[in-house]
């Protein structure tokens, strides 16, 4: 109903405003963040994490930026997409959000920390790879929980 929808919209706005104020009021450097999605959303394509990964789109880049991070490999509103794994190495993110499902047949043999060349990425070197249970890539009502999760890791970033 209209009142319920309006209440949800206002709650989302309040969460976003609070997150933005928390970040604006700190003098921290904005961390570069990569959000890796599970390949299960595109099961017809076989992924090889040594060559390509799926990065989050839709709401994820906007949420990363609202939380005070920089989403340099994906832009707000664009869909999840495949990128060359070397782009992540070149980007040198400070934080990696691992949003891959635990049942994925590819993920079971793939640890982000063990990928060739990824040990030199600041996020991996500094143990700043975070496993998220909240789906932050798709437009859904997990927005508040996901945004709060991103804000907490950005504010904790040193």
Image (cartoon, rainbow, N blue to C red):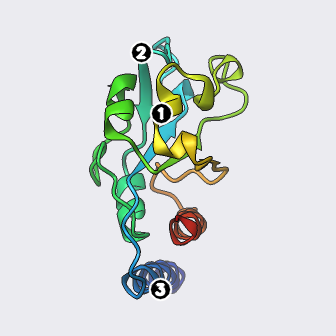
Q: Do the residues labelled 2 and 3 touch (CB within 8 Å)?
A: no
Q: Position of residue 49 (x, y in %)?
A: 50, 19
Mark 1 vs mark 3: in front: 1
Q: Is residue 110 visible?
A: yes
Number of other residues with Cα within 10 Å of mark 3, as a class: few under 14, some 14 to 19, many 20 or more: some
The residue indicated by pointer 3 is 18
Q: Choose the circle earlier in sequence order: 2 or 3.
A: 3
Secondary structure of the residue carrying tag 1 is: helix
Distance, label 2 to label 3, CA atoms, is 38 Å
Q: Are marks 2 and 1 in contact (CB under 8 Å)?
A: no
Distance, label 2 to label 1, CA atoms, is 17 Å
Secondary structure of the residue carrying tag 2 is: loop
Q: Where is residue 53 in the image (x, y as percent from the top left)?
A: 44, 26
The residue indicated by pointer 1 is 120
Q: Position of residue 44 (x, y in %)?
A: 48, 14
Number of other residues with Cα within 10 Å of mark 2, as a class: few under 14, some 14 to 19, many 20 or more: few
The residue indicated by pointer 2 is 51
Mark 2 vs mark 3: in front: 2
Q: Which residue is drawn at 67% across and 50% down?
A: 133
Q: Choose the circle earlier in sequence order: 1 or 3.
A: 3
Q: Which residue is drawn at 44% across and 30% down?
A: 54
Q: Position of residue 83 (x, y in %)?
A: 34, 27
Distance, label 1 to label 3, CA atoms, is 34 Å
- Location of residue 42 with respect to 55 vertically, above or below: above
Mark 2 vs mark 1: in front: 1
Q: In which quarter of the image is residue 99?
A: top right
Q: Is residue 84 visible?
A: no
Q: Residue at x 50, y 81 (%)?
A: 15
Q: Residue at x 32, y 30 (%)?
A: 87
Q: Choose the circle earlier in sequence order: 2 or 1.
A: 2
Q: Nearer the viewer, residue 14 or 126?
A: 126
């Amino acid at each position: 109903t209209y009142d319920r929808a309006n209440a949800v919209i206002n709650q989302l706005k309040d969460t976003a405003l609070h997150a933005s104020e928390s970040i604006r009021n700190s003098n921290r450097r904005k961390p570069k963040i990569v959000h890796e999605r599970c390949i299960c959303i595109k099961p017809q394509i076989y992924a090889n994490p040594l060559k390509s990964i799926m990065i989050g789109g839709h709401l994820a880049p906007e949420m990363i930026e609202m939380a005070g991070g920089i989403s340099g490999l994906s832009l707000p509103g664009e869909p999840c997409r495949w990128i060359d794994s070397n782009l992540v190495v070149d980007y040198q993110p400070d934080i990696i959000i691992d949003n891959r499902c635990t049942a994925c047949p590819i993920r079971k043999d793939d640890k982000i920390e063990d990928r060739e060349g990824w040990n030199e990425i600041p996020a991996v070197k500094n143990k700043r790879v975070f496993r998220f249970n909240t789906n932050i890539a798709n437009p859904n009502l997990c927005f508040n929980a996901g945004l709060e999760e991103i804000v907490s890791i950005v504010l904790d970033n040193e």
